[in-house]
Amino acid sequence: MSNRTVSEGGIRETRASGDRDLRLDFFRGLALWFIFVNHIPANQISWLTPRNFGLSDATEIFVFISGYTAAMVYGQTLRQSGLAMAAAQVLHRCWTLYATYIILFFAFTAQIAYLARVFDSPLFTEEMGIASYFQDPVTALTQALLLKFRPANLDVLPLYIVLLLAFPLALPALARRPLAVLAGSGALYLAARLFGWNLPTHPDGGVWYFNPFAWQFLFVVGATLQHLPDLRAALLRFRRPVAAAAVAFLALSLFLVLSWQFAFLHALLPPWLTEILYPVSKTDLDPLRLAHFFALSYIVVQLVPPGAAWLRSPLAAPVVACGRQSLHVFCLGVLLSFAAQTVLVHISGSLSAQFLVTVIGTAAMVLLARLLIWYQSAERARRLQIATTRNSGA
């Protein structure tokens, strides 16, 4: 397409040339589906998600693509309109994300409190991490506004807000010396892991589940690769030894994950090896998780080249639609996952019920995404018609 404006997960993106890379939308949408399914406790359908087959999961997919698309969108604004406008757009997006998070916080808290009362399940408030909200609502609300207090399942959005809020500081350097930015990001990642840096949460004594000092590295890797297409092409070029190593590491990761579920597999691991490998921290983005994500990405890119025809097929369309409307779909998924949990706990926990709530929730997310895409398309057409009418009258 040429000089066409499209929606990129709630961000408007203009690309001067080249086709839209639907892989970004597809895999971001797939990550949102996985997050929804994984947020439903005791859901056997979650066995089909990546976290049960390797060391990384949907969070790595989401953060990497977020960094890549942020560099693409705001990097173009930087080139066309300068740093001030790029920074203003980033801050505007951060405000949108923050306002959305606060609304989601109130909606999710109210949902938990209402269903806990209806089903007489006070343990819901403990399980979802909001008990202190009812004990001291003023303090809890203040801490929520500071992103320090949040219920379970809301950790990804504050992480994204913080990463994007710092992005204007790196954007000019990314345009000039992206490898230097990557090196600085890597140093911060290592320091955070070495010295235990993290942000505090409420109640006191806790830390962010997704350590932003560590997770920023994956975000910056995505942004750097977007700024360096030659390096990206070189790294992703098919090489048989690299592909073999990636497949071998994925197989080893699968074995490790299965060993957590099956004792006879865990017994095959020598004690000295487990002392080296564990714990595989998700909070601090363990290097093994990074290695698994990079190996998986390399294999996926080989299997799904740019412009793959099936990405435009009706089968992929629901996933792509969710990827294009990632913010709204994520928020709905959070609310639906707790509703599904309530159904499984208080109505039926059968396998058919698990399948049903998963399908209904996913279908609702797809419906919302398609409604938003329809509305945005209709609104653009309306504005174009108004502009054309005015120009004709003039």
Image: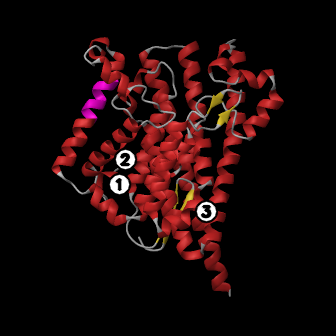
Q: Secondary structure at mark 2?
A: loop
Identify the mark at residue 312; answer none if there is no mark: 1
**Residue 35 located left or right of residue 204:** left
**Which residue is disc 2 drawn over?**
316
Per the model, the C-alpha gap separating discs 3 and 1 is 23 Å
Q: Amino acid at mark 2?
A: Ala
Crowd rating for badge 2 (residues with CA inside 10 Å; few <14, some 14–19, many 20+)? some
Crowd rating for badge 3 (residues with CA inside 10 Å; few <14, some 14–19, many 20+)? few
Identify the mark at residue 379; answer none if there is no mark: 3
Q: Amino acid at mark 3?
A: Glu
Residue furthest toward the left?
Answer: 240
Q: Residue placed at 44% from the left, 38% from the top?
A: 58
Per the model, the C-alpha gap separating discs 3 and 2 is 25 Å
Query: Which contiguous range is marked in magenta?
Result: 250-257
Colour scheme of the rendered structure: secondary structure
**Residue 126 located left or right of residue 192:** right
Q: Are marks 2 and 1 in contact (CB under 8 Å)?
A: yes
Question: In the image, residue 40 lies at what x, y percent?
Answer: 51, 25
Question: In the image, residue 237 lies at what x, y percent?
Answer: 24, 57
